[in-house]
Amino acid sequence: MTWQDIDAEKGQIFIRPEVAKQTDGMLECIVDFTEPLKKRADFFQQRTGKLHQEKKLPWSDLKKLPWSDFPENALRHSFAT
């Protein structure tokens, strides 16, 4: 997703089929802002580029994480949150 997919003035997020997990045949999906997003609408103004910038941890930090305690889909779901 990109920052341009978020329309703060209308209070909507446009989810293109190519970034949706499941499209169920829909060509597009528009999601209205929830109350917490409405309160932060100013934050979304004038932003450009990709919504997520990958941040890599040093290998020494990654080795310290308790990987066996994480469910298989933990990273995907934590990113979505």
Image (cartoon, grey):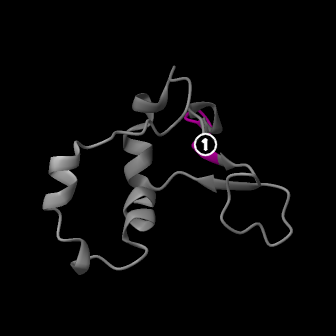
Which residue sits furthest top? Answer: 46
User: Which quadrant would residue 74 be assigned to in this image?
Assistant: bottom left
User: Which quadrant would residue 1 be assigned to in this image?
Assistant: top right
Residue 80 falls left or right of residue 2? left
- Residue 55 location (% of width, % of height): 34, 39
Which residue lies at the image location 64% right of the left edge and 38% below the top edge? Answer: 5
- Residue 51 location (% of width, % of height): 51, 37
| Above or below, comparing residue 71 to residue 9 in the picture | below
> In the image, what residue type sits under mark 1?
Met
- Tell me the residue that label 1 is attached to: 1
User: Which quadrant would residue 10 be assigned to in this image?
Assistant: top right
Mark 1 Cα shell of 10 Å, populated few (<14), some (14-19), many (≥20): some
Q: Which residues are magenta?
A: 7-13
Q: So how many labels did they put on this image?
A: 1
- Residue 63 location (% of width, % of height): 18, 58
Residue 63 falls left or right of residue 73? left
Q: Quadrant of the C terminus?
A: bottom left
Q: Is residue 10 magenta?
A: yes
Which residue lies at the image location 74% right of the left edge and 49% below the top edge? Answer: 16
Query: Closest to the observer: 60 or 16?
Result: 60
Tag 1 secondary structure: loop
Which residue lies at the image location 77% right of the left edge and 66% below the top edge? Answer: 23
Residue 20 falls left or right of residue 43? right
| Above or below, comparing residue 51 to residue 79 in the picture | above
Which residue lies at the image location 68% right of the left edge and 59% below the top edge? Answer: 20
Residue 9 falls left or right of residue 16? left
Q: Is residue 3 magenta?
A: no
- Residue 28 location (% of width, % of height): 79, 54
Query: Closest to the observer: 57 or 18?
Result: 57
